[in-house]
Image (cartoon, grey):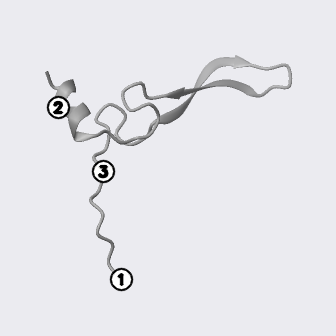
Amino acid sequence: MPQHTRPRPICPDCDGFPTVAITTGQRSTTGQRQTLMVTCRACNGTGHRTPAALAQAGK
């Protein structure tokens, strides 16, 4: 049975990858790398933008 939902536009700032782990280059006392989880500020971590938000971003 087909779905009748329109695809949501992907955020142009993060290309659909809203959350990334960035290494700090330092290691913890156990030897693991320390990382920071960072989310896209443009889409608030959803990976998608609404058409209205895209129109305002272009102005």
Q: Which residue is mark 1?
A: 1
Count residues near mark 2 (Cα–Cα under 10 Å), then give few for <14, some for 14-19, many for 20+: few
Lower position in the chain sequence, tag 2 or tag 3: 3
Separation of residues labelled 2 and 3 (CA atoms): 15 Å
Q: Position of residue 18 (x, y in %)?
A: 45, 36
Q: Secondary structure at mark 3?
A: loop
Q: Which residue is mark 2?
A: 55
Between 58 and 5, which is closer to the camera in this rendering?
5
Q: Quadrant of the C terminus?
A: top left
Lower position in the chain sequence, tag 1 or tag 2: 1
Lower position in the chain sequence, tag 1 or tag 3: 1
Residue drawn where x is 27% and y is 46% of the image: 9
Identified by mark 3, the residue type is Arg
Report how many numbered discs are placed on residues in the image: 3
Q: Position of residue 8 (x, y in %)?
A: 30, 50
Q: Residue furthest right?
A: 30
Which label is found at residue 8? 3
Separation of residues labelled 1 and 2 (CA atoms): 34 Å
Between 27 and 3, which is closer to the camera in this rendering?
3
Quarter residue 17 falls in? top left
Quarter residue 41 falls in? top left
Q: Position of residue 10 (x, y in %)?
A: 31, 44
Q: Quadrant of the N terminus?
A: bottom left
Which label is found at residue 41? none
Residue drawn where x is 33% and y is 72% of the image: 3
Quarter residue 5 falls in? bottom left
Identified by mark 1, the residue type is Met
Q: Secondary structure at mark 2?
A: helix
Identified by mark 2, the residue type is Ala
